[in-house]
């Protein structure tokens, strides 16, 4: 009788494993929908999911059933997976997507709040530079207008006088 009870417990455990596999599959689907990675990385995601599920099933079977694999264990996993996909998948996926949405918004808000001191510090540090650059911009604009005016005035002067000034100011 003890042997039969152990097999029933193992069968129920394999049903729970099937439900958990379905749960992991919905986590995978939710992450895929929310993150929307490039389609070329899909095989990498699939392989990662299968390795995780296989490792999980292997560890649980090794821990509970000493690694013995029987047909009824596969049957229990299939029953658990089908039960999960038919009865619980839609609800869990909806809540999981909402959880991902709220988590993403929470992290974005925390990030924005964390950036506030840096933005204030940036304004404090760069304000003097901005004032100086604006002042230099206006001075350069004034100098440009002054030089244009000076150039126009020199056109009106005789050529000999301009050549003398050039020799005086721009010696080679």
Image (spheres, rainbow, N blue to C red):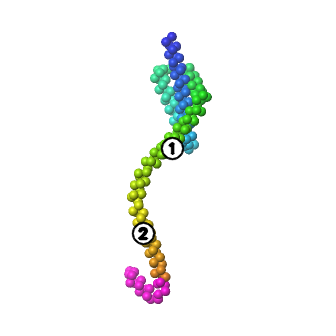
The residue at which mark 2 appears reads as 136
Tell me which residue sits at (55%, 23%) in the image: 15
Q: Mostly what secondary structure, the magenta segment?
A: helix
At which x and y percent is residue 17?
52, 26
Circle 2: is it few (<14), some (14-19), or many (20+) Cα within 10 Å? few
Q: Position of residue 9 (x, y in %)?
A: 51, 18
Magenta-drawn stretch contains 7: no
Work out how far the residue at label 1 is from the one at label 2, CA to CA, in angstroms: 43 Å
Q: Nearer the viewer, residue 167 or 144?
A: 144
Q: Which mark is residue 162?
A: none
- Pointer 1: what residue? 105
The total number of labels drawn is: 2
Residue drawn where x is 58% and y is 24% of the image: 79
The residues colored magenta run 153-172
Work out whether 109 lies above or below 140: above
Q: Residue furthest right?
A: 86
Q: Residues within 10 Å of mark 1 (few under 14, many from 20)?
A: few
Q: Where is residue 12 shown, x and y percent of the image?
A: 53, 20
Identity of the residue drawn at 43% across and 48% down: 114
Quadrant for the C terminus, please: bottom left
Question: Which sits earlier in the primary sequence, circle 1 or circle 2?
Answer: 1
Q: Nearer the viewer, residue 89 or 109?
A: 109
Task: Based on the picture, tell me whether residue 161 belongs to the magenta stretch.
Answer: yes
**Height in image: 80 above or below 160?**
above
Secondary structure, mark 1, is helix
Pick whichever, 15 or 144, lies toward us.
Answer: 144
Q: Is residue 139 visible to the viewer in this orientation of the structure? A: yes
The picture places residue 152, in percent across and down from the top left corner, at: 49, 82
The residue at the point 46 percent across, 84 percent down is: 154
Viewer-proximal residue among 61 and 79? 79
């Amino acid at each position: 009788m003890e042997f039969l009870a152990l097999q029933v417990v193992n069968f129920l455990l394999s049903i729970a494993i099937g439900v958990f596999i379905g749960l992991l599959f919905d986590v995978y689907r939710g992450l895929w929908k929310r993150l929307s990675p490039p389609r070329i990385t899909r095989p990498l995601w699939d392989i990662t999911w299968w390795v995780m599920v296989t490792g999980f099933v292997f560890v649980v079977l090794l821990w509970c059933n000493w690694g013995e694999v029987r047909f009824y264990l596969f049957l229990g996993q299939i029953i658990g997976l089908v039960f999960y996909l038919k009865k619980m998948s839609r609800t869990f996926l909806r809540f999981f997507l909402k959880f991902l949405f709220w988590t993403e918004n929470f992290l974005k808000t925390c990030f924005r709040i964390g950036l506030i001191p840096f933005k204030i510090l940036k304004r404090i540090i760069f304000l003097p530079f901005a004032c100086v650059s604006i002042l230099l911009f206006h001075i350069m604009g004034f100098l440009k207008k002054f030089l244009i005016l000076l150039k126009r005035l020199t056109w009106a002067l005789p050529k000999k006088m301009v050549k003398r000034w050039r020799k005086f100011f721009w010696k080679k």
